[in-house]
């Protein structure tokens, strides 16, 4: 995989979720396993809705995820 600077937010999320069952996390977020897998494998982006879901589940700011995605996209 090509390395980007800054990294895809999925890489950061993957590290944060290390050791957790992806199916369980997807259910907790209210998304499909496929949707979460695409993000974790840097094939999908963080939408505003997903940023809200992640912030609620992880105790982070929705803006954090959106800023990471915007930085990666530029």
Image: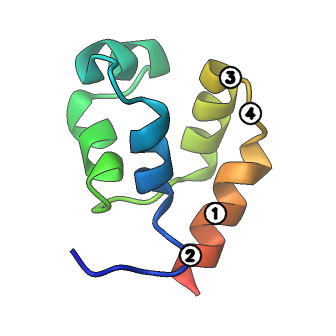
* Disc 1: which residue: 68
Point out the tag, 2 or 1, that comes first from the N-terminus: 2
From the top left corner, tell me how far across and down residue 15 is, in percent. Answer: 43, 41
Q: Is residue 49 above or below residue 18?
A: below
Q: Residues within 10 Å of mark 2 (few under 14, many from 20)?
A: few
| Residue 9, x across and y down, in percent | 51, 57
Q: Which mark is nearer the camera, 2 or 3? A: 2
- Would you say the residues marked 4 and 2 are in contact, meaning their CB atoms lie under 8 Å apart? no
The alpha-carbon separation of the residues under discs 3 and 1 comes to 17 Å
Q: Is residue 31 left or right of residue 38?
A: right
N-term mark: 2 or 3: 2
* Mark 1 neighbour density, 10 Å: few (under 14) some (14–19) many (20 or more): some
Q: CA distance from mark 2 to mark 3?
A: 24 Å
- Mark 3 residue crowding within 10 angstroms, few (<14) / some (14–19) / many (20+): few
From the image, tell me which residue sits under label 3: 56
What residue is rendered at 26% in x and 50% in y?
38
The Cα atoms of the two marked residues, 4 and 2, are separated by 19 Å
Q: Residues within 10 Å of mark 4 (few under 14, many from 20)?
A: some
Give the number of marks.
4
What residue is shown at x 62% (from left), y 43% (from top)? 51
């Amino acid at each position: 995989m090509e390395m980007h600077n800054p990294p895809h937010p999925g890489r950061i999320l993957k590290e944060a979720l290390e050791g957790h069952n992806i199916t369980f996390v997807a259910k907790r977020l209210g998304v499909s396993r496929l949707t979460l897998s695409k993000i974790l494998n840097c094939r999908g982006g963080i939408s505003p809705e997903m940023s809200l879901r992640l912030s609620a589940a992880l105790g982070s700011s929705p803006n954090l995820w959106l800023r990471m995605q915007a930085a990666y996209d530029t």
